[in-house]
Image (tube, rainbow, N blue to C red):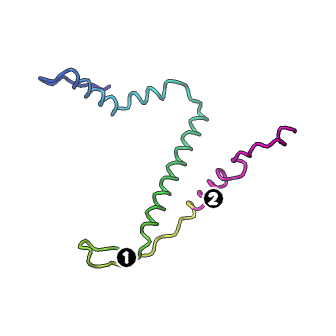
């Protein structure tokens, strides 16, 4: 339970502001919203899997961004006067490659794209 004591000479508004921040930090309102309605276990599982996929893709994008920036084979010393040679970048792991292939199969297949409407579809 969150609480805030009134400090000497403190206004009610600033006390309420501190209390609201304490409640927000504790995650009470977020927890309340989450428990507002029942979520089936299968829906929970799907939501968590989607969040995990999103985190993984974000991590991959971040890695790819940093790799593209570091195409150089050297780095500078602190004074920026001498180039220090660097080891070549590591190859993508098998697990990552498999994850990307699986993601592309699921999300980039032809069945996921809507076909444009034609008059012939209406005649069937």
| Mark number, residue 108 | none
Task: Give the crowd class for mark 1: few <14, some 14-19, many >=20 residues within 10 Å.
Answer: some
Number of callouts in the render?
2
Left or right, 10 with respect to 72, comes to left
Q: Position of residue 82 (x, y in %)?
A: 28, 79
Label 2 sits on a secondary structure element that is helix
Q: CA distance from mark 2 to mark 1?
A: 32 Å
Q: Residue at x 59, y 30 (%)?
A: 40
Q: Secondary structure at mark 1?
A: strand
| Among numbered discs 2 and 1, the one appearing first in the sequence | 1
Q: What is the quadrant of residue 80 in the picture? A: bottom left
Query: Where does label 1 land, which residue?
Result: 74
Give the farthest residue toward the left.
Answer: 9
x 49%, y 49%: residue: 55
Q: Which residue is mark 2?
A: 101
Looking at the rendered image, the quarter that the C terminus falls into is: top right
The residue at the far right in this view is 124
Magenta residues (range):
97-124
Image depth: mark 2 or mark 1 in front: 1
Q: Is residue 105 on the magenta stretch? A: yes
Whole-percent x, y for residue 86 in the image: 38, 76
Q: Is residue 13 toward the left or the right of residue 47 in the image? A: left
In the orientation shown, which residue stands out farthest toward the top?
A: 12
In terms of image quadrants, where is residue 9?
A: top left
Graded by Cα atoms within 10 Å as few (under 14), some (14 to 19) or many (20 or more), the crowding at tag 2 reads few
Instruction: Name the residue rendered at 52%, 69% in the picture.
Output: 91
Where 39 sits versus 102, above or below? Answer: above
Q: Which residue is more in the foreground, 21 or 11?
A: 11
Determine if the magenta segment contains residue 68: no
| Residue 10 at x, y percent in the picture | 15, 24
């Amino acid at each position: 339970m969150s609480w805030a004591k009134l400090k000497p000479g403190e206004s009610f508004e600033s006390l309420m502001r501190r209390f609201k921040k304490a409640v927000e930090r504790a995650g009470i309102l977020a927890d309340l919203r989450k428990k507002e309605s029942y979520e089936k276990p299968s829906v929970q599982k799907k939501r968590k899997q989607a969040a995990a996929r999103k985190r993984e893709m974000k991590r991959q994008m971040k890695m790819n961004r940093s790799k593209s920036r570091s195409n150089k084979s050297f780095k500078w010393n602190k004074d920026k006067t001498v180039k220090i040679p660097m080891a070549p970048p590591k190859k993508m792991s098998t697990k990552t490659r498999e994850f990307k292939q699986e993601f592309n199969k699921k999300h980039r297949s032809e069945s996921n794209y809507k076909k444009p409407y034609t008059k012939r579809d209406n005649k069937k």
